[in-house]
Amino acid sequence: MRLFIALRFNDEVTAKLQAAVDALRSQSIRGNFTRPENLHLTLVFLGEQPDPANYIRALETLEAYCLKIQLAKTGRFKHEGGDIVFAGFQGGDELKTLYRAVCRALERAGFACGGSEYIPHVTLGREVVFKQSAGMAYVDRLLRGITIPANAVSLMCSERTGGQLVYSELYAVPLKKR
């Protein structure tokens, strides 16, 4: 099974992000847009794994605190045939601290973590081709200032069901209150 560790969003944040996805869709010629139930912030991608039990045990040792993070603007990873468009975060130091805490928990359990620079983002669409260059600025206005409470870290499973990507939460560990 294909696993990743992520922050999930409450209904209010999901609705605001979905409004940004809808705006992105309206500004695009084409794209593969993230469905509301799949919106999340990946902390660590684990890839194909035979059994989630060891990752659950690792997450049970996680020592990290609740935090609030704020969206800043859209960005994109350019690709031939269409870009990955994402919501980026203001600052990001607290998120990187959480990422490092998750990596420490995984490493204590014997799993490798990291390897490349962590760029926290929420994917809004893949293979996106804009109608005009001002399309991202329009989406930016909807994202600016959205605050996301992070109260738990989730082990997620990614599966293709009926031709659609479905993300399921396998386990969630609450973050400590400050």
Image (cartoon, grey):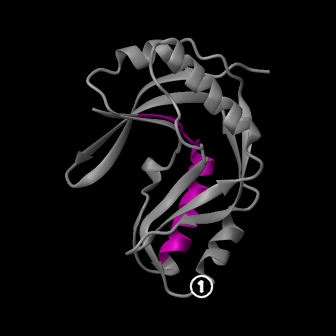
- Examine the rendered structure and indicate whether residue 11 appears above or below residue 85: above
User: Residue 75 falls in which quadrant of the image?
Assistant: bottom right
* Residue 151 shows in the view: no
Give x and y (percent) for residue 44: 50, 35
- What segment is highlighted magenta in the picture? 4-25
- Secondary structure under badge 1? loop
Give x and y (percent) for residue 62: 59, 17
**Depth order, front residue of 7/91:** 91
Q: Is residue 16 magenta?
A: yes
Q: Amino acid at mark 1?
A: Ser
Give x and y (percent) for residue 99: 62, 32
Q: Farthest front residue?
A: 115
Is 176 positioned to the left or the right of 37 in the image? right
**Depth order, front residue of 139/83:** 83
Is 116 positioned to the left or the right of 151 in the image? left
Which residue is at 76% across, 57% downward?
145
* Residue 131 shows in the view: yes
Which residue is at 27% across, 54% downward?
164
Which residue is at 42% across, 19% downward?
55
- Examine the rendered structure and indicate whether residue 44 appears above or below residue 29: above
Which residue is at 56% across, 11% downward?
61
Q: Which residue is mark 1?
A: 133
In the picture, which quadrant includes the N terminus?
top left
Q: Is residue 6 magenta?
A: yes
